[in-house]
Each structure stands twice: as C-alpha cells, then as structure tokens.
Amino acid sequence: MNQMKETMSVFKEVFEMPNEYKQNMYANDDLKTCRKFTSSLRYETEKVHLWRDSLRHPSHPLDQWQHLWPENPITYRECVGDFSVKIKELGWRIMDLISEGLGLQRLSKHKDPYLITILMQDDVSGLQVLKDGKWITVEPLPGAFVVNIGHLLEIISKGKLKSAEHRAVTNSSHTRTSAAFFIAPLDDCLIEPAEDLTDENNQPILKSFKYKEFLKQFFNTLGDSYLLLKSFEAPKN
Ligand SMILES: O=C(O)CCC(=O)C(=O)O
Ligand SMILES: [Fe+2]
C-alpha cells in the first residue's frame, strides 16, 4: 500500500517538472525509448486531441532500460524500478491463475509413451503424479532421479507395471528446470503384450504395433491414454 502511494506520487511529480526539462529529456521522437507526449503518439495527424500527457518507457530487464528513465525526480529510477519488479511478479501470478482457470497447465496429464523415463529435476518442485484421483507432488531430492514407467512397459507387462499419469505445473516465483531422458525402442520395433504373462489386470487386448505408429497416435490423441489404446485394440472375433 505504501509502495503504491509512494510510486504514485513519483509519477505525479514527473509531470510537475518544469516544461524545459521535460521537453529536453523526452522529446517525442520515435527513436527515444523514454517518451513524454501529449495526446497520442501521432499528435500532428490525429483528428481529435486527447486531454492527457503521457510518459512511456520499457522496464524489463531493468539493467537494459533503467538508465534511460527520467533522472528527476531523484527517486524515480529506484522507486519505479522496485515497483515494476513487483508488478511483473503480480502479472505472472495473474497469468498463472488465468491459465489454471482455463484448465491449462505447463505440461498436461500424460503417461510417457516410452519404456522408462529418467528424470532429473532441479530443486524447484513441479512434477505431480495422479494417485487415487489426487495429484501428488514428487518433491525433488538432491542427487536423485525420478524413474517413470512408460506406457509401453505397461502394455508389454499387461498392466503388471503401471505407468503413472503425471504432469508438471508452474509456480509464480521460481524458474524450474527439468531434463527428461527417454528410453525408447527403435521406430520400427514391434510392440505387443508379453505372451508369457497372464491377462489378470483387465488390460484391453491389443494387437502388435510398430513403435512409430504408437508415437504418432500419442501425439494425435494429445496424450489421452484411453483414446490412444483404443486405436491399438485387437479386432474382436
Ligand atoms: O518436467 C517434468 O518434471 C516432467 C517432464 C515430463 O513429464 C515429460 O517431459 O514427459
Ligand atoms: Fe512425462
């Protein structure tokens, strides 16, 4: 609240500076990044003039622009700089909420379409697995990999090995980096449920398919496991 008031008064002050100073510092020149103008950016050609003065400048990254901002009032650069960092964070928080509201995540629910995945995460959490209808965060452990059973291994093992549905979510304050290493068959490799295993896990009966067909369907069905398996069901006799 205080910071809002403080910044607002700095903005007011900048327009109260003597005219000569304003004219010199921020001539309304297309090449200047920091511009002070009356009405719109096209005063000469506009049909109607707007009753306003504006000051416009880029803000981020600060070290690229801040030195081009107004020198006066003396507190302008620091005050507006601090404030613009907060506003940027607020902007991203709002974006996160909008994205959540629209049902968008950073990486939506899926099973990896491979054999296994070896995942390396930094220390920012974001990976979640679906267990009994609930999303559970897989907290990063220093020096540890997450090993995910892929969809192919679930198919081959007739469901003895379960491929966890997972997703990765964002947060508003820390950048997260992960590196996923996928262990996958060759494109033309033939995949089928292992004959030696029993059908005890209620898996759909699948025909053999080439790995590359599976991968293509995975992307066509946008990771929807049900639709994906549907296209590889064995014809019913
Ligand atoms: O970023 C992560 O932790 C998950 C990445 C992932 O699931 C994937 O690339 O398949
Ligand atoms: Fe994944």
Image (tube, helix red, strand yellow):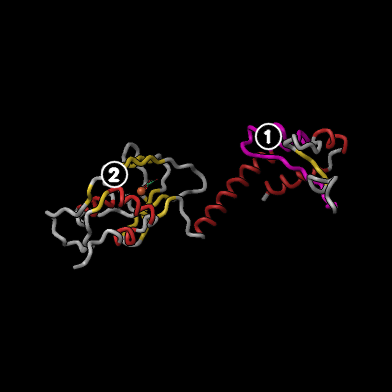
Residue 62 magenta-highlighted: yes
| Quarter containing the C terminus | bottom left
Amino acid at circle 1: Gln
User: Residue at coordinates 26% horizontally, 50% vertically from top-left?
Assistant: 210
User: Residue at coordinates 16% horizontally, 61% vertically from top-left?
Assistant: 199
Residue 8 visible at all: yes
Q: Which residues are magenta?
A: 49-78
- Return the residue nearer the eye: 102 or 46: 46
User: Residue at coordinates 35% horizontally, 51% vertically from top-left?
Assistant: 216
User: Residue at coordinates 28% horizontally, 42% vertically from top-left?
Assistant: 183
Q: Which residue is mark 1?
A: 66
Image marks 1 and 2: residues in contact by CB distance under 8 Å: no
Q: Position of residue 119 (x, y in %)?
A: 34, 42
Q: Position of residue 13 (x, y in %)?
A: 80, 42
Residue 10 visible at all: no
Q: Position of residue 218 (x, y in %)?
A: 35, 53
Q: Is residue 135 left or right of residue 172?
A: left
Regarding mark 2 in the picture, which secondary structure is present there? loop
Label 1 – label 2 distance at C-alpha: 52 Å
Q: Residues within 10 Å of mark 1 (few under 14, many from 20)?
A: many
Ligand 1 closer than 8 Å to label 1 CB: no
- Return the residue nearer the eye: 68 or 7: 68
Give the total number of marks visible in the rendering: 2
Q: Position of residue 75 (x, y in %)?
A: 73, 37
Amino acid at circle 2: Asp
Residue 187: numbered disc:
2
Earlier along the polypeptide chain: callout 1 or callout 2? 1
- Return the residue nearer the eye: 191 or 95: 191
Q: Quadrant of residue 160?
A: bottom left
Of badges 1 and 2, the one in the foreground is 2
Q: Is residue 103 left or right of residue 90?
A: left
Q: Residues within 10 Å of mark 2 (few under 14, many from 20)?
A: few
